[in-house]
Image (cartoon, rainbow, N blue to C red):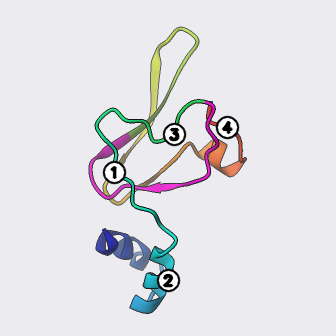
Amino acid sequence: MNQILKNQFRKIIDITDDEFDYISGHFTYQKLKKHQFLVQDGQNVDYDYFVLSGCVKSYYSDENGKIHILLFGVQDWWITDYEAYYYQKKQS
């Protein structure tokens, strides 16, 4: 896990191993099962998630029940409900 995240940071900034060790201490590993939700309707969105492996989709259902996919997050990508995250709103 740490090497993928470290490489992500090193794409953007120069970072020592000690600095990365400090930063990585602020991350929590979470493994999801297939079809498990990362964020659910009505939940506060407090985190931006980093995908280590697999694929996560961000979508919403309209009033007719039709699903609209907003984006896919694959390995080495960040994903969340960005509107709810930035404006500290509940996921809708």
Task: Residue 18 in the image: state x and y as whole percent.
Answer: 44, 91
The amino acid type found where label 2 is placed reads: Tyr
Secondary element at image label 4: loop
Residue picked out by circle 3: 39
Q: Earlier in the sequence, mark 2 or mark 1?
A: 2
Distance, label 3 to label 1, CA atoms, is 13 Å
Measuring 32% from the left and 58% from the top, which residue is drawn there?
52
Distance, label 2 to label 4, CA atoms, is 30 Å
The amino acid type found where label 4 is placed reads: Lys
Task: Residue 56 in the image: state x and y as whole percent.
Answer: 36, 42
Q: Are marks 3 and 1 in contact (CB under 8 Å)?
A: no
Q: Nearer the viewer, residue 22 or 54?
A: 22
Residue picked out by circle 1: 31
Position of residue 78 relative to residue 34, above or below, is below
Q: Which residues are magenta?
A: 42-56
Distance, label 2 to label 1, CA atoms, is 22 Å
Task: Residue 3 in the image: state x and y as whole percent.
Answer: 30, 75
Measuring 67% from the left and 37% from the top, which residue is drawn there?
90
- Does the magenta run of residues contain 60? no
Residue picked out by circle 4: 90
The amino acid type found where label 1 is placed reads: Lys
Secondary element at image label 3: loop
Q: Earlier in the sequence, mark 3 or mark 2?
A: 2
Q: Earlier in the sequence, mark 4 or mark 3?
A: 3
Q: Earlier in the sequence, mark 1 or mark 4?
A: 1
